[in-house]
Image: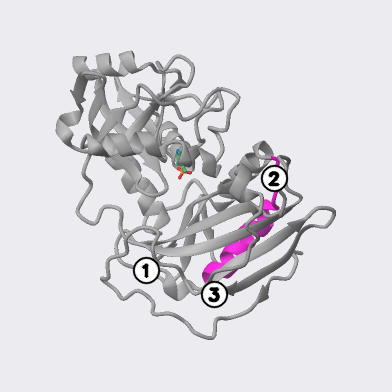
Amino acid sequence: MFPEITVTKTTSPRQKPQPGQPLPFGHIFSDHMFVMDYVEGQGWINPRIVPYGPFEIEPSAMVFHYGQAVFEGLKAYMCEDGSINLFRPACNFERMNNSNDRLVIPKVDVDFCVYATKKLVELDKDWIPSGKGESLYIRPFVIATDPYLGVRASSTYKFFILLSPSGAYYAHGIKPVKIYVEDKYVRAVRGGTGFTKCAGNYGCSLIAQTIAHESGYEQVLWLDGVEQKYIEEVGAMNIMFIIDGKLVTPSLAAGSILPGITRRSCIEIAKSMGMEVEERKISIEEVIEAGKSGRMQECFGCGTAAVVSPVGELKYEDTVIHINNGEIGPITQKFYDTITGIQSGKVEDKFNWITKVD
Ligand SMILES: *Cc1c(COP(=O)(O)O)cnc(C)c1O
Protein backbone atom coordinates (compact mmCIF):
# COMPACT_ATOMS: atom_id res chain seq x y z
CA MET A 1 0.00 0.00 0.00
CA PHE A 2 1.09 3.53 -0.71
CA PRO A 3 1.48 6.18 1.98
CA GLU A 4 -1.63 8.31 2.37
CA ILE A 5 -1.69 11.54 0.39
CA THR A 6 -3.37 14.27 2.41
CA VAL A 7 -5.52 16.65 0.38
CA THR A 8 -6.09 20.31 1.18
CA LYS A 9 -8.50 21.73 -1.35
CA THR A 10 -8.33 25.31 -2.50
CA THR A 11 -10.90 27.67 -1.01
CA SER A 12 -10.58 30.03 -3.97
CA PRO A 13 -10.76 27.99 -7.19
CA ARG A 14 -9.55 29.96 -10.15
CA GLN A 15 -11.18 30.52 -13.51
CA LYS A 16 -10.66 27.46 -15.67
CA PRO A 17 -9.80 27.92 -19.33
CA GLN A 18 -12.87 28.20 -21.53
CA PRO A 19 -13.30 25.93 -24.56
CA GLY A 20 -11.66 27.61 -27.53
CA GLN A 21 -9.46 29.85 -25.38
CA PRO A 22 -5.84 29.86 -26.57
CA LEU A 23 -3.58 27.94 -24.16
CA PRO A 24 0.00 28.92 -24.84
CA PHE A 25 2.37 26.38 -23.29
CA GLY A 26 3.27 26.70 -19.62
CA HIS A 27 1.45 29.83 -18.49
CA ILE A 28 -1.67 28.58 -16.73
CA PHE A 29 -1.66 26.27 -13.70
CA SER A 30 -4.44 24.20 -12.19
CA ASP A 31 -5.85 24.69 -8.68
CA HIS A 32 -3.66 22.13 -6.92
CA MET A 33 -0.15 20.72 -6.80
CA PHE A 34 1.43 17.66 -5.28
CA VAL A 35 4.33 18.08 -2.84
CA MET A 36 6.49 15.77 -0.74
CA ASP A 37 9.68 16.30 1.24
CA TYR A 38 12.85 14.33 1.58
CA VAL A 39 14.68 14.26 4.89
CA GLU A 40 17.83 12.24 5.27
CA GLY A 41 17.15 9.21 7.47
CA GLN A 42 13.40 9.43 6.88
CA GLY A 43 13.12 9.23 3.10
CA TRP A 44 10.34 10.90 1.10
CA ILE A 45 7.71 11.98 3.61
CA ASN A 46 4.56 14.01 3.99
CA PRO A 47 3.03 13.48 0.54
CA ARG A 48 0.26 16.01 0.07
CA ILE A 49 -1.93 17.77 -2.43
CA VAL A 50 -2.27 21.46 -1.64
CA PRO A 51 -3.54 24.55 -3.45
CA TYR A 52 -1.16 25.69 -6.21
CA GLY A 53 0.72 28.77 -5.08
CA PRO A 54 3.99 30.31 -3.91
CA PHE A 55 5.86 28.62 -1.07
CA GLU A 56 8.58 29.72 1.31
CA ILE A 57 12.16 28.72 0.76
CA GLU A 58 15.39 30.03 2.24
CA PRO A 59 17.57 32.13 -0.09
CA SER A 60 20.45 29.89 1.00
CA ALA A 61 18.64 26.79 -0.30
CA MET A 62 21.22 24.79 -2.21
CA VAL A 63 19.21 24.59 -5.43
CA PHE A 64 19.87 28.28 -6.07
CA HIS A 65 23.62 27.90 -5.76
CA TYR A 66 24.71 24.51 -7.00
CA GLY A 67 21.92 23.47 -9.29
CA GLN A 68 20.58 20.24 -7.85
CA ALA A 69 17.33 20.43 -9.80
CA VAL A 70 15.73 17.89 -12.12
CA PHE A 71 12.39 17.80 -13.89
CA GLU A 72 10.13 15.67 -16.05
CA GLY A 73 7.37 16.35 -18.56
CA LEU A 74 4.36 14.26 -19.59
CA LYS A 75 0.73 14.80 -20.46
CA ALA A 76 -2.80 13.72 -19.57
CA TYR A 77 -5.37 13.46 -22.36
CA MET A 78 -9.16 13.64 -22.10
CA CYS A 79 -10.75 10.91 -24.19
CA GLU A 80 -14.11 11.23 -25.92
CA ASP A 81 -15.68 8.77 -23.44
CA GLY A 82 -14.61 11.01 -20.51
CA SER A 83 -11.79 8.72 -19.36
CA ILE A 84 -8.31 10.15 -18.89
CA ASN A 85 -5.12 8.77 -20.43
CA LEU A 86 -1.53 9.12 -19.22
CA PHE A 87 1.13 8.16 -21.78
CA ARG A 88 3.84 5.83 -20.34
CA PRO A 89 4.05 7.71 -17.02
CA ALA A 90 6.29 5.14 -15.32
CA CYS A 91 8.94 5.86 -17.97
CA ASN A 92 9.08 9.46 -16.80
CA PHE A 93 9.67 8.58 -13.15
CA GLU A 94 12.20 5.92 -14.10
CA ARG A 95 14.02 8.57 -16.10
CA MET A 96 13.72 10.99 -13.18
CA ASN A 97 15.51 8.42 -11.04
CA ASN A 98 18.34 8.26 -13.57
CA SER A 99 18.56 12.06 -13.40
CA ASN A 100 18.40 11.95 -9.60
CA ASP A 101 21.19 9.39 -9.42
CA ARG A 102 23.48 11.53 -11.56
CA LEU A 103 22.76 14.65 -9.45
CA VAL A 104 23.07 12.72 -6.14
CA ILE A 105 19.39 13.31 -5.38
CA PRO A 106 17.59 10.43 -3.63
CA LYS A 107 15.41 8.28 -5.86
CA VAL A 108 11.64 8.40 -5.80
CA ASP A 109 9.27 5.42 -5.79
CA VAL A 110 8.14 5.15 -9.41
CA ASP A 111 4.80 3.45 -8.69
CA PHE A 112 3.98 5.90 -5.92
CA CYS A 113 4.76 8.87 -8.19
CA VAL A 114 2.46 7.47 -10.89
CA TYR A 115 -0.20 7.03 -8.20
CA ALA A 116 0.33 10.61 -6.96
CA THR A 117 0.09 11.90 -10.55
CA LYS A 118 -3.21 10.07 -11.01
CA LYS A 119 -4.59 11.47 -7.74
CA LEU A 120 -3.66 15.02 -8.66
CA VAL A 121 -4.97 14.76 -12.23
CA GLU A 122 -8.20 13.19 -10.94
CA LEU A 123 -8.71 16.07 -8.50
CA ASP A 124 -8.05 18.72 -11.17
CA LYS A 125 -9.60 16.84 -14.08
CA ASP A 126 -11.82 19.78 -14.96
CA TRP A 127 -8.60 21.53 -15.97
CA ILE A 128 -7.92 19.06 -18.78
CA PRO A 129 -8.84 20.82 -21.99
CA SER A 130 -10.67 18.54 -24.41
CA GLY A 131 -10.27 20.31 -27.74
CA LYS A 132 -8.42 18.58 -30.57
CA GLY A 133 -4.73 18.26 -29.73
CA GLU A 134 -5.16 19.82 -26.30
CA SER A 135 -3.86 18.19 -23.13
CA LEU A 136 -2.88 18.74 -19.53
CA TYR A 137 0.88 19.10 -19.25
CA ILE A 138 2.31 17.50 -16.10
CA ARG A 139 5.55 18.84 -14.65
CA PRO A 140 7.17 16.82 -11.84
CA PHE A 141 10.39 18.30 -10.44
CA VAL A 142 12.79 18.04 -7.52
CA ILE A 143 14.89 20.75 -5.85
CA ALA A 144 17.56 20.72 -3.12
CA THR A 145 16.53 22.68 -0.05
CA ASP A 146 19.29 22.56 2.59
CA PRO A 147 19.98 26.14 3.73
CA TYR A 148 23.74 25.83 3.28
CA LEU A 149 26.43 27.42 1.13
CA GLY A 150 28.99 24.64 1.09
CA VAL A 151 29.32 22.54 -2.04
CA ARG A 152 27.96 19.06 -1.32
CA ALA A 153 24.78 17.12 -1.95
CA SER A 154 21.80 18.49 -0.03
CA SER A 155 20.27 16.33 2.70
CA THR A 156 16.75 17.69 2.13
CA TYR A 157 14.68 18.02 -1.04
CA LYS A 158 11.22 18.91 -2.22
CA PHE A 159 9.36 17.09 -4.98
CA PHE A 160 6.45 18.78 -6.76
CA ILE A 161 3.98 17.99 -9.50
CA LEU A 162 2.34 20.91 -11.31
CA LEU A 163 -0.43 20.74 -13.92
CA SER A 164 -0.75 23.15 -16.82
CA PRO A 165 -3.53 23.04 -19.43
CA SER A 166 -1.87 23.15 -22.79
CA GLY A 167 -3.13 24.05 -26.25
CA ALA A 168 -2.66 22.07 -29.44
CA TYR A 169 0.97 22.27 -30.51
CA TYR A 170 -0.18 22.36 -34.11
CA ALA A 171 -3.14 24.69 -33.91
CA HIS A 172 -2.45 25.78 -37.50
CA GLY A 173 -1.46 22.42 -38.97
CA ILE A 174 1.89 20.65 -38.90
CA LYS A 175 4.51 23.00 -40.27
CA PRO A 176 8.11 21.88 -40.76
CA VAL A 177 10.72 23.85 -38.81
CA LYS A 178 14.02 25.41 -39.79
CA ILE A 179 16.93 24.13 -37.76
CA TYR A 180 20.34 25.62 -37.13
CA VAL A 181 23.20 23.19 -36.56
CA GLU A 182 25.23 24.63 -33.68
CA ASP A 183 28.97 24.48 -34.47
CA LYS A 184 30.40 26.52 -31.57
CA TYR A 185 28.64 25.74 -28.30
CA VAL A 186 28.00 22.24 -26.98
CA ARG A 187 25.28 21.00 -24.68
CA ALA A 188 26.66 17.77 -23.26
CA VAL A 189 29.76 15.63 -23.19
CA ARG A 190 30.53 12.00 -22.53
CA GLY A 191 30.43 11.53 -18.76
CA GLY A 192 28.34 14.68 -18.30
CA THR A 193 24.64 15.18 -17.64
CA GLY A 194 23.21 15.04 -21.17
CA PHE A 195 21.09 11.97 -20.41
CA THR A 196 19.38 13.73 -17.49
CA LYS A 197 16.62 16.31 -17.41
CA CYS A 198 18.59 18.50 -15.03
CA ALA A 199 17.92 22.23 -15.02
CA GLY A 200 21.53 23.14 -15.83
CA ASN A 201 21.35 21.47 -19.24
CA TYR A 202 18.75 24.01 -20.32
CA GLY A 203 20.41 27.07 -18.78
CA CYS A 204 23.57 26.38 -20.75
CA SER A 205 21.69 25.87 -24.02
CA LEU A 206 19.91 29.23 -24.06
CA ILE A 207 22.71 31.15 -25.73
CA ALA A 208 22.64 28.96 -28.84
CA GLN A 209 18.85 29.04 -28.90
CA THR A 210 18.94 32.85 -28.74
CA ILE A 211 21.45 33.14 -31.57
CA ALA A 212 19.49 30.69 -33.71
CA HIS A 213 16.31 32.72 -33.20
CA GLU A 214 18.12 35.90 -34.20
CA SER A 215 19.06 34.28 -37.49
CA GLY A 216 15.50 33.13 -38.19
CA TYR A 217 15.88 29.51 -37.08
CA GLU A 218 13.42 27.92 -34.68
CA GLN A 219 15.61 25.31 -33.01
CA VAL A 220 19.20 24.27 -32.50
CA LEU A 221 20.60 20.90 -33.52
CA TRP A 222 23.45 19.98 -31.19
CA LEU A 223 26.59 18.17 -32.24
CA ASP A 224 28.67 15.99 -29.91
CA GLY A 225 30.82 17.79 -27.35
CA VAL A 226 34.11 16.13 -28.28
CA GLU A 227 34.54 16.36 -32.05
CA GLN A 228 31.51 18.51 -32.88
CA LYS A 229 30.94 16.11 -35.70
CA TYR A 230 28.16 13.72 -34.69
CA ILE A 231 24.47 14.58 -34.42
CA GLU A 232 23.02 14.59 -30.90
CA GLU A 233 19.57 16.13 -30.56
CA VAL A 234 17.43 19.24 -30.94
CA GLY A 235 16.49 21.68 -28.09
CA ALA A 236 14.07 19.46 -26.18
CA MET A 237 13.56 16.82 -28.86
CA ASN A 238 15.41 13.82 -30.18
CA ILE A 239 16.17 13.75 -33.87
CA MET A 240 15.38 11.08 -36.44
CA PHE A 241 16.16 10.64 -40.11
CA ILE A 242 14.66 8.43 -42.77
CA ILE A 243 17.62 7.51 -44.95
CA ASP A 244 17.22 4.91 -47.72
CA GLY A 245 13.93 3.94 -46.09
CA LYS A 246 15.54 3.16 -42.71
CA LEU A 247 14.90 4.96 -39.45
CA VAL A 248 18.28 6.33 -38.36
CA THR A 249 18.77 8.06 -35.02
CA PRO A 250 21.78 8.83 -32.81
CA SER A 251 22.62 6.11 -30.31
CA LEU A 252 22.25 6.87 -26.60
CA ALA A 253 25.46 5.03 -25.75
CA ALA A 254 27.65 8.03 -24.86
CA GLY A 255 25.14 9.27 -22.27
CA SER A 256 25.09 12.75 -23.80
CA ILE A 257 21.58 12.48 -25.27
CA LEU A 258 18.28 12.58 -23.40
CA PRO A 259 16.52 9.21 -23.80
CA GLY A 260 13.18 10.51 -25.01
CA ILE A 261 10.04 8.49 -24.42
CA THR A 262 8.71 9.69 -27.78
CA ARG A 263 11.99 8.54 -29.38
CA ARG A 264 11.55 5.12 -27.81
CA SER A 265 7.92 4.99 -28.94
CA CYS A 266 8.80 5.88 -32.56
CA ILE A 267 11.44 3.14 -32.57
CA GLU A 268 8.95 0.61 -31.23
CA ILE A 269 6.35 1.61 -33.82
CA ALA A 270 8.94 1.45 -36.62
CA LYS A 271 10.00 -2.04 -35.58
CA SER A 272 6.37 -3.16 -35.35
CA MET A 273 5.90 -1.96 -38.95
CA GLY A 274 8.89 -4.05 -40.01
CA MET A 275 11.03 -1.00 -40.65
CA GLU A 276 14.76 -1.23 -40.20
CA VAL A 277 16.02 0.91 -37.30
CA GLU A 278 19.61 2.02 -36.84
CA GLU A 279 20.68 3.57 -33.55
CA ARG A 280 24.22 4.65 -34.22
CA LYS A 281 26.62 7.53 -34.63
CA ILE A 282 25.60 9.75 -37.50
CA SER A 283 27.84 12.58 -38.62
CA ILE A 284 26.63 15.94 -39.83
CA GLU A 285 28.53 15.29 -43.09
CA GLU A 286 26.50 12.14 -43.64
CA VAL A 287 23.27 14.05 -43.06
CA ILE A 288 24.24 16.88 -45.41
CA GLU A 289 25.35 14.36 -48.03
CA ALA A 290 22.16 12.28 -47.67
CA GLY A 291 20.13 15.48 -47.90
CA LYS A 292 21.87 16.67 -51.05
CA SER A 293 21.75 13.31 -52.81
CA GLY A 294 18.10 12.72 -51.98
CA ARG A 295 18.86 9.60 -49.93
CA MET A 296 17.33 11.31 -46.90
CA GLN A 297 13.58 11.26 -47.38
CA GLU A 298 12.52 12.67 -44.03
CA CYS A 299 13.91 14.30 -40.91
CA PHE A 300 12.00 15.10 -37.73
CA GLY A 301 12.38 15.94 -34.08
CA CYS A 302 10.34 14.00 -31.52
CA GLY A 303 9.33 14.84 -27.96
CA THR A 304 6.33 15.05 -25.64
CA ALA A 305 5.45 18.65 -26.56
CA ALA A 306 5.08 18.28 -30.33
CA VAL A 307 5.11 14.46 -30.64
CA VAL A 308 6.88 14.92 -33.99
CA SER A 309 8.23 18.06 -35.57
CA PRO A 310 9.22 17.68 -39.22
CA VAL A 311 12.41 19.48 -40.22
CA GLY A 312 12.13 21.32 -43.52
CA GLU A 313 15.49 23.04 -43.51
CA LEU A 314 18.88 22.42 -41.89
CA LYS A 315 21.66 24.99 -41.86
CA TYR A 316 25.22 23.87 -41.08
CA GLU A 317 28.00 26.43 -41.47
CA ASP A 318 27.42 27.79 -44.98
CA THR A 319 25.36 24.89 -46.24
CA VAL A 320 21.57 24.86 -46.24
CA ILE A 321 19.65 21.71 -47.13
CA HIS A 322 15.94 21.43 -47.75
CA ILE A 323 14.11 18.24 -46.85
CA ASN A 324 11.00 16.77 -48.48
CA ASN A 325 10.04 20.11 -50.10
CA GLY A 326 9.31 21.57 -46.67
CA GLU A 327 6.47 19.14 -46.07
CA ILE A 328 5.80 16.45 -43.47
CA GLY A 329 6.76 13.03 -44.86
CA PRO A 330 4.55 9.90 -44.78
CA ILE A 331 6.57 8.10 -42.09
CA THR A 332 6.70 11.14 -39.81
CA GLN A 333 2.93 11.47 -40.32
CA LYS A 334 2.45 7.79 -39.46
CA PHE A 335 4.31 8.19 -36.15
CA TYR A 336 2.29 11.29 -35.38
CA ASP A 337 -1.04 9.64 -36.15
CA THR A 338 -0.21 6.47 -34.23
CA ILE A 339 1.09 8.18 -31.09
CA THR A 340 -1.56 10.91 -30.91
CA GLY A 341 -4.23 8.30 -31.74
CA ILE A 342 -3.14 6.10 -28.84
CA GLN A 343 -2.88 9.10 -26.50
CA SER A 344 -6.38 10.33 -27.28
CA GLY A 345 -7.86 6.84 -27.11
CA LYS A 346 -8.79 6.73 -30.81
CA VAL A 347 -6.23 4.11 -31.83
CA GLU A 348 -5.97 0.73 -30.16
CA ASP A 349 -3.23 0.73 -27.51
CA LYS A 350 -1.57 -2.46 -28.74
CA PHE A 351 1.74 -1.49 -27.12
CA ASN A 352 0.16 -1.12 -23.67
CA TRP A 353 1.36 2.47 -23.29
CA ILE A 354 -1.70 3.96 -21.64
CA THR A 355 -2.30 4.27 -17.90
CA LYS A 356 -5.85 5.27 -17.10
CA VAL A 357 -6.49 7.81 -14.36
CA ASP A 358 -8.85 6.15 -11.80
C1 LIG B 1 12.48 16.07 -22.76
C2 LIG B 1 13.53 16.06 -23.80
C3 LIG B 1 13.45 15.24 -24.94
C4 LIG B 1 12.23 14.45 -25.31
O1 LIG B 1 11.86 13.51 -24.38
P1 LIG B 1 10.36 12.95 -24.35
O2 LIG B 1 10.37 11.98 -23.24
O3 LIG B 1 10.11 12.34 -25.66
O4 LIG B 1 9.50 14.14 -24.12
C5 LIG B 1 14.55 15.21 -25.80
N1 LIG B 1 15.64 15.96 -25.56
C6 LIG B 1 15.74 16.78 -24.49
C7 LIG B 1 16.97 17.55 -24.29
C8 LIG B 1 14.69 16.86 -23.59
O5 LIG B 1 14.78 17.68 -22.55
Residue 18 shows in this picture: yes
Quickly name the residue at label 2.
105
Amino acid type, label 3: Leu
The quadrant in which the N terminus is found is: bottom right
Disc 2 and disc 1: Cα gap in Å? Answer: 34 Å
The residue tagged with tag 3: helix, strand or loop? helix
Instruction: Name the residue: 81% across, 53% down.
Output: 40
Please, what is the dominant secondary structure of the magenta stretch? helix
Query: Residue 270, image x and y in percent?
Result: 40, 33
Residue 76, compared with residue 235, is above or below; it is below
In the displayed structure image, the side of residue 1 where residue 225 appears, left or right:
left
Q: Any atom of ligand 1 within 8 Å of the CB at mark 2?
A: no
The quadrant in which the C terminus is found is: bottom right
Query: Residue 138, image x and y in percent?
Result: 49, 59
Residue 305, compared with residue 248, is above or below; it is below
**Mark 3 or mark 1: whose residue is earlier in sequence:** 3
In the displayed structure image, the side of residue 133 where residue 48 appears, left or right:
right
Please name whichever residue, 134 or 344, is drawn nearer the observer in this view of the structure.
134
Please name whichever residue, 102 or 250, is drawn nearer the observer in this view of the structure.
102
Mark 3 near mark 1, Cβ–Cβ under 8 Å? no
Quickly name the residue at label 3.
123
Quickly name the residue at label 1.
129
Instruction: Name the residue: 48% across, 53% down.
Output: 74
Residue 329 shows in this picture: no
Segment colored magenta: 104-123
Instruction: Name the residue: 71% across, 61% down.
Output: 37
Mark 1 neighbour class, 10 Å CA radius: few under 14, some 14 to 19, many 20 or more: many
Mark 2 near mark 3, Cβ–Cβ under 8 Å? no
**Mark 2 or mark 1: whose residue is earlier in sequence:** 2
Query: Residue 180, image x and y in percent?
Result: 28, 30
